[in-house]
Image: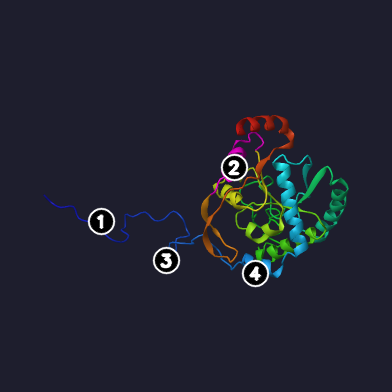
Amino acid sequence: RRRASPPPVGRSESTPRAPFRELGAIEQTDNLRVQTIRPLLSPACAIEEIELPLQSKRLVLRARCDISAVVQGDSDRLLVLAGPPAVHDPSEAMEYAARLAALAAELESEILVVMAVNLSRSSSDADDDDAAAAPGGGWAGLVTDPRLDGSVDMNSGFRAARRLLLDIAQLGLPTAVEYVDTITPQFVADLASYALVGARQAGSRAHRELASGLSTPVGFQGGATSADAAVDAVRSAASGHAFLSVSKQGVAGIVQTTGNRDGHLVLPAASAAEAAEAACGALA
């Protein structure tokens, strides 16, 4: 019997060509669709440049404890997150924050006011899953495109975000930040008293792992029709996890967390009563 011959090495005339035009030299098999990769400032450098003073650290920590007490049912105060849909102009944001700080002081015995500072395009506002819109595709966020010119100068964006959060803290007003991705928290989490995970990210394993290690209470937004993903996220974030992430020094590492007992649901206002009943049943 004739033995089968091994297949020839290399491309034959009958081998179909690749269906994508990005195929370059045969030696290159990676980053075929990547345009540029630029260095990113390490979180540690950003924190050192724009450091949180001791008085503001005390405010952040006290607010976290107060929010935790509300979440755990140990406080009768109502937690209210208030803020503009998008934050980009620091002067306008500070004008809003100054007015909100005055109102928060007036109502502090009954209401715990936290300013929501939306640094990135919220997942609930995006038309797709890409938080960094292409030029002409809408606002991408203070961090992603601080100059509003498509330059994507995120190093300047993170610095601007830290300065803004620090200035708001110095007014005596705690802040909440929605984490659309899992890298941004390394740059700003020390300044925030509350974290929010949007409805689209609530089902993300990476965001549940992130939440399990956050030093703040974290709210998971329920969807318009179902809170199931957010309920599962609360349960998952309460447990410890091990996963890959980036350290404050900007180095990839293996992270192990203890779990976050301050995870909770944030329900859509339109159907809050029905959603709350369903969610409480699911958590029982």
Q: CA distance from mark 3 to mark 2?
A: 44 Å
- Name the residue tied to disc 2: 233
Counting residues from the start of the chain, the first of labels 3 and 1 encountered is 1
Q: Amino acid at mark 2?
A: Ala
- Name the residue tied to disc 1: 7
Residues 208 and 148: in front is 208
Element class at badge 4:
helix
- Name the residue tied to disc 4: 45
Q: What is the number of the mark on residue 25?
A: 3
Counting residues from the start of the chain, the first of labels 2 and 4 encountered is 4
Q: Is residue 229 above or below residue 216?
A: above
Q: Is residue 236 above or below residue 131?
A: above
Q: Amino acid at mark 3?
A: Ala
Q: Which stretch did the figure color magenta? A: 223-240
Question: In front: mark 2 or mark 1?
Answer: 2
The image position of residue 213, as x and y in percent, is 60, 52
Number of marks present in the image shown? 4
- Asked if the residue at tag 3 contacts the one at tag 4, i.e. Cβ–Cβ closer than 8 Å, the answer is no
Q: Amino acid at mark 1?
A: Pro
